[in-house]
Image (cartoon, grey):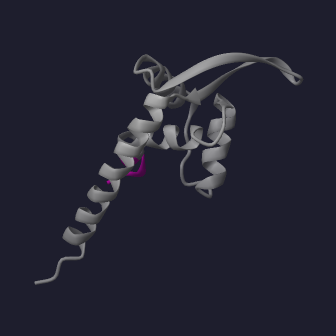
Amino acid sequence: MRKSELLKGSTEMVLLSILKNRDMYGYEIIEELKRISDGYLLFKEGMLYPALKKLEEKELVKSYWRDSLEGPSRKYYYITKNGVRELKEQITEWELFHEIINKVVHHQK
């Protein structure tokens, strides 16, 4: 399975996880994910912003504009209480899924 397919399936959980720590603007999210994952998780803007919009529509994330000293205003995103609840559920599901896949992959007769 390609990395991009795995990432698409876990985009929501990854974004909620990164936003649980602090409010961030788009480029900052991309750079933070790259840093934390040692370059493994590479989001492109064309993937990030539609995903953030979807999270906003589900009311898992909200946004606001903040002035920047380094150019135009930036749109910051933050996780909502519903987003925190959803993240906890997704992490629980992910951990179970990961455990089951490991059992299957490492199963010996």
Q: Picture coordinates of residue 29 (x, y %)?
A: 63, 37
Q: Residue at x 58, y 55 (%)?
A: 37
Q: Is residue 13 left or right of residue 67?
A: left
Viewer-proximal residue, 53 or 46? Answer: 53
In the image, taking residue 19 as reference, residue 86 lies left or right, namely: left
Determine whether, in the image, residue 48 is placed left or right of residue 89: right
Q: Is residue 90 above or below residue 24?
A: below
State the predominant SS element of the stretch in magenta. Answer: helix
The quarter of the picture where the N terminus appears is bottom left
Q: Is residue 9 above or below residue 37?
A: above
The percent coordinates of residue 100 (x first, y second) are: 23, 63
Q: Is residue 101 above or below residue 56?
A: below
Residue 79 occupies quadrant? top right
In the image, which residues are magenta?
1-6
Residue 86 spot, x, y in % from top left:
39, 36
Whether residue 55 is visible to the viewer of this picture, yes or no, is: yes
Query: Measuring 43% from the left and 29% from the top, which residue is drawn there?
Result: 82
Q: Quadrant of the C terminus?
A: bottom left
Name the foreground residue: 87 vs 102: 87
Residue 84 in the image, given as x and y percentages of width and height: 47, 37
